[in-house]
Each structure stands twice: as C-alpha cells, then as structure tokens.
Amino acid sequence: MVERRGSTAVFDGTLSAMSFRRASSVLPLLLVAASQSGCAVSDASDDAAAVFDRTVLHTVAITVDQGHLDQLATDLDDRVPCTIVYDGEEVSGAGIRQKGNSLVDLSDKPSFSLKIDEFDEEAELRGLKKLLLNSAKQDPTFLREQIGEELHDRAGVPAARSAHAVVTFNGVDKGIYVVTEAVDKRFLRRHFGEVNDEGALYEGPCCGDFVEDLDAVELDGGEDEGAAELRALAGVIRDTPDEQLEARVSERLDLDRFITGFALEALLGHWDGYAFRANNYYLYKNPADGRFVFIAHGMDRILEDAWFDPETAPVAVLPGRIRAIPALDERFHAELARVASAAWDERAVLTVVDEVAQLIGTASAGEATQSDLSGFTARVSALRNDLKLRRSLVDPAIACGDGELEGLETCDDGNTAGGDGCSARCRVEP
C-alpha cells in the first residue's frame, strides 16, 4: 500500500490509456447527448442578454414605499410593490420579496426575488418577467455562480445566466450583488425552443429528494399535468431492479443529461446540489419527448472544498443507484473524464475570474460596496489557487492502479481489483 505524499498531478489535456479505455465505449454516446436540445437556442432578439452582460457592472435601484417595509421584512412568501431602475431603465408595477429560507434584516444585505409583472401584467425588463438578486453572503468572491454557469455551458447542460451589479435600496447602498436569471418560461424557451416552454416545471425543496418526498416538490410553472408522470418516475427510480433501471429510467428521464449534471456536481464539489444534499434542483417535463430534465441552480457554494472527493457517496436515490450498478457507475466515471478533459478549460475559467476582478474593481459606490470590494480582493487569489488545485486533483490522466499516489487517491497498490484494503477507485476501503 502506498501512502499519500500530498503531491498533485499536472494536467496535460489528455486521458491516460487506462482512463480512455474505460471511457471509450461510453464517451461517443454522451458527447452526442450533450449536444442535443437543452443547450441555449440562438436568438438574435434576446433583449435580456443586455441584463446579463458580463462586461458591465450593472446598477439596480429598488424603491419600496414605507408602508410595505414591514411586510418585506417579515414575509418570505408574498411580494410587495416596488419600482426598479436597472441600468437607467425604470420598471413600475414590479413585486419584491426576500429570497431564501430565512429572513434578513432590511438594514443588512438581503437577497431579493423580483417579479417584474407582479402588479402590472404588461411590465417587463428586456423581456424578463423575473429576476434574482443574490447577496452572495456565502460567496464573497461573487464568482462561484458564474464559474458554475461557464462549466455547465461548456458541458452542454442548461444553466442560468448571471452578472454583477451594485444595488441600492430606497437610496441606501447595499453593495455588490450577483444578478441571476430565473429558471422560468423564458429560460426554458431559450434552452428548449419556443414550442417547448409549456412543460411542467417543478422546484425541489431544501432539502428533500422527490423520489422519497414527492409532495414537497413545488409546481413552479406550466400546467400540473406532469404530476402523475413525476410520481411514476419516482417509483421507477425507487423500485426497478438493477438490471432494468437504465432502460426504464431513460423512458421517463433524460438520463444522459442527468449523468452529465451528476458528474459536474462531483467535479465542482457542489455539495449543496441534488446528488449530495438533495437541494437546488428543478425538474422540467420537456414536451419535445415527454421526459424529465434536471436543471441545477444555487451554485454559490461550489469549489468551497478543493479536496472534495468525487467518490463521495450521494444522498439522493438516483445518483446512489447509479453508483451501485457497475454499468452505470462506468458511465458516470466516463463522464467525469469527459467533462474534466473537454469542458473544464482552466485558462477560460481563470479568464472569467480575471474579467470579473477587473469589473468589480471599478465599483466606487458607498460603504457597503467598498466593504464587498475589500472582501472580494482578499479572497479572489485563494479562489484562483483552488481552481488550479481542483483541476489537478481531478485530472483524468491520473490512473488508478499504476502504483502512483496522485490527485485524490488515498491508496494505489498497483491493482484495481479491490478487496485488499484498496478499492477499485484507489480509495482506502472501509
């Protein structure tokens, strides 16, 4: 048995022979699947692109009448009227509520959910009807959502757009926020096409797996015609014998895309997502083929732990079953290798970091913004280092069974048979 030396591998952009042989039978299928419907649909008329322009540090001014402040401070469910000025464009008739699972004092820095047409059905902001303003209290780099978006896009999986803004509330500086696209009908239209935006969209609770607690899943859009099918999918995932699971789940769920999303969660250390916490997910019944699609969101905690092990046991039922069935487990590992090699372009991701750093550095508003800028400056270098470290730790060129202890391996005794204290994935067996 070889003990950890603490060394990391250097990425050379290639798969090892062993990794490639393991993945070769599966990669073509997954590469085709990743390029199917669900990637952003090009639309020259997408006025909302200006709202999420990454080259602009946007400004958002929110005004709420004094008579509605008590409700905004104490009610997480119902919106109150507000006026929004986004980059100088004023929208009246909007509604606002705090976003999240707990209330934040309005004198602090709450996150907000804005429904543009809440009190005026004709109101819109560049075609958008909903917008999220995330305070990024859990991510002082303001970058994790955008990094997650970048890598999901590169892997062929839908993800919400994001940008950055300086926000004021009733004239008071609130600091730097992450402006995030809502997963709604407009999001679905952009990713699945104009004719496919009417499918039922369900939001998963925090923190519950729909397979075990279907009643906790909330209908977020469309007609509730998918409820019976969602219940049927849960039953198939829960009760189907191993040898039939892949075929039967694939009839009701885009399994290729799900495995790509699972691989992304594992690679990004997204412990707050569906696989590892049964949190931050949507289920969309795509009218194009009648199957469900998973959509990730809430990626503000990714890469918090550069040493997060992709072999960590999932808590959600479907990822757990995938890991327990050898053929599906091989598909998962093949997709880990594909995403790490083809989608994780370290130079491109670090360019995103550098561009945001330059953009946020132009902030010059009040005390709250200056405090956010100081926090960003103090932490952005550590994020850059963690990105580089993470990429080296999950390098697909690292070969289990070669006798070299590399990356996230906790043992490597020169074989991949397991059963001798070192597992087939080069982790110490319990």
Image (tube, rainbow, N blue to C red):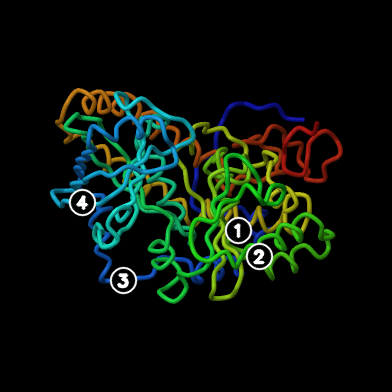
Which residue is disc 4 drawn over? Answer: 92
Q: Is residue 213 left or right of residue 186?
A: right
Q: Is residue 226 visible?
A: yes
Residue type highlighted by circle 1 = Phe
Residue type highlighted by circle 4 = Ser
Secondary structure under the numbered disc 3 in the rendered image? loop
Which one is earlier in the sequence, the residue at label 1 or at label 4?
4
Q: Which residue is drawn at 66% across and 46% down?
A: 209
Q: Where is residue 146 in the image (x, y as percent from the top left)?
A: 37, 46
Secondary structure under the numbered disc 2 in the rendered image? loop
Q: Is residue 358 visible?
A: no
Camera-near label (1 vs 4) is: 4
Q: Which residue is drawn at 60% across and 73% down?
A: 290
Q: Quick one: 61 or 409, which is closer to the camera?
A: 61
Determine the image quadrant of residue 261. Answer: bottom right
Q: Using the numbered discs, state the Cα–Cα distance from disc 2 to disc 3 in whole angstroms.
A: 32 Å
Which one is earlier in the sequence, the residue at label 3 or at label 4?
3
Secondary structure under the numbered disc 4 in the rendered image? strand
Which residue is disc 2 drawn over? Answer: 26
Residue type highlighted by circle 3 = Asp
Which residue is disc 1 drawn over? Answer: 258
Which residue is disc 3 drawn over? Answer: 43
